[in-house]
Image: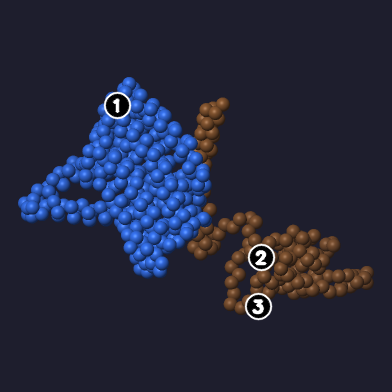
Amino acid sequence: MFSFQQWAAQIHSFLLEKTGTYTLLIECIIIGILAISLFAILGLVLVLMERKVAAHIQIRMGPNRVGPAGMLQTVADTLKLLMKEGLVPRLADKFLFNLAPFLVMMVAMMLLAPIAFARGVQIWDINIGVLYITAVSSVSVIGVMMAGWSSNNKFAMLGAMRSGAQIVSYELSAGFSILCIVVLSGSLQISDIIASQESGWWLFRGHIPVLIAFVIYIIAVTAETNRAPFDLAEAESELTAGFHTEYSGMRFALFFLAEYINIFIVCALGATLFLGGWMPLHIAHWDGFNHLMDWIPSSVWFMGKTFFLIFLIMWFRWTFPRLRVDQLLNLEWKYLLPIGLLNLLLVTWIAIKGWHF
Amino acid sequence: MFIKEYIKEVYQGVSSLLKGMKKTGYYFFHPSEIITQQYPDNRHELKLPERFRGEVVMAHDDNNEHACTGCTACELACPNGTIKIITKMDLTPEGKKKKALDTFIYHLELCTMCNLCIEACPTNAIQMAQTFEHSVYDRNKLTKKLNQPNSKIREGVE
């Protein structure tokens, strides 16, 4: 059967033979190119998916003119953005203004490192993978603040401030839900967490507390990625476009792309923690069924779960109205955080007693 | 009690959110619900809503008779002077003079399709048609005469 690990090992030995000491450098470049192309493809696919899902939820058709069934719409949009002039406001802080989109993009790229895409396909299997992701994802708020402050625009500033308040507060609940799984699996390493779900996904094995943690996680990451119903940072009706009001052309495209990459990453992490990553659906003692599930490639499992979560997030983006600032903070500090704390206590109790399946 | 209220609030919030998601999820999985009209492509099988308002028309029957008495109720109801009615004096068979419609002038270029004239009409002489492809190269063509030449009022309409 086709296996990525064998393939990677073959390339590695081939490079070692041909280039010797430069192998690591060449491998790094290959990984970089692969990551960038993954970003480009994900950006195109996710934007198209969002527009199509939005259209069908609102009983519309969505893009259907460019290419077969509108498939090339996002390619056309990207070409348009590439050709646009990247304006910089005269009184903007030019250095920070130009740096901000790259910082946001860089954070998104760094987050890609510990994600396991399939069996053995992982750029960096660091032993504190989950901690790394939670730590690095909070850096993106600096990029947003930088963009808002350097634009010399009131709307951008307000949007950035809101975004800061939002990301800082929602990170807490996201962290608590992630901790639930860390407690259950007893490891911060992504590959260990996936391996601990061999006999069943934590979502099913952890009773109701893990289900609550999953719901809190989904809500918190929606807020963290600044998406509706928590898109106060770029509330169109109030702040035109929030922190990227002054951006145009390719710099705007980078912000736009980073938003979608962040969605992909948080959904991939959610799939890894709660739905077993690339692990197929296994039910204890059903050997025939388990064998059949093993036959489906692990990358298909991972992508399927991730895109299911992305669909979930898009679903409630297009269902719910935007929250007010006070409602947003109420939801976090009065509901999600206390419930998350109590939930963590319950999960720890379950883990100590060994009540999970 | 505080805790009871709190749990009730959470329950109500979650259940109302799920209700909304059920509706949008239903729409997502039922593409037959899509109401978009692919207009230039489906010009011949276009389905317009029953109450779509395209322009004001006056219905004439086979004898070239309409139901307009020339009462000018529509002209008075019109908020922006779209309708102008010119009346004339007809002689009834008994030799009495009677007011009748001479020309019903309708300025389509001014009309906002507000439907007030149709509601004001006491004899249902005018209706809203569903035609909407009104673009022309000369705006004079948009000033229309709604009653057909030599038409007269239907017998028995007062």
Q: Nearer the viewer, mark 3 or mark 1?
A: 1
Mark 1, other Cα within 10 Å: few <14 / some 14–19 / many ≥20: few
Taking depth in this image into account, of A150 and B109 the one nearest to the observer is: A150
**Amino acid marked by disc 1:** Ala
Q: Residue at x 69, y 72 (%)?
A: B107
Q: The C terminus of chain B appears in which quarter of the rendering?
A: bottom right
Q: Are marks 3 and 1 on the same chain?
A: no
Q: Which residue is mark 3?
A: B140
Residue placed furthest toward the top: A353
Disc 3 is placed on an element classified as helix
List x then y, in percent, for residue A282.
29, 31
List x then y, in percent, for residue B111.
67, 67
**Amino acid marked by disc 2:** Thr
Mark 2, other Cα within 10 Å: few <14 / some 14–19 / many ≥20: some
Q: Are marks 2 and 3 on the same chain?
A: yes
Q: Residue under mark 2: which chain is it in?
A: B
Lateral position of residue A251 relative to residue B132, left or right: left
Q: Residue at x 27, y 55 (%)?
A: A37
The chain displayed blue equals A
Q: Residue under mark 1: which chain is it in?
A: A
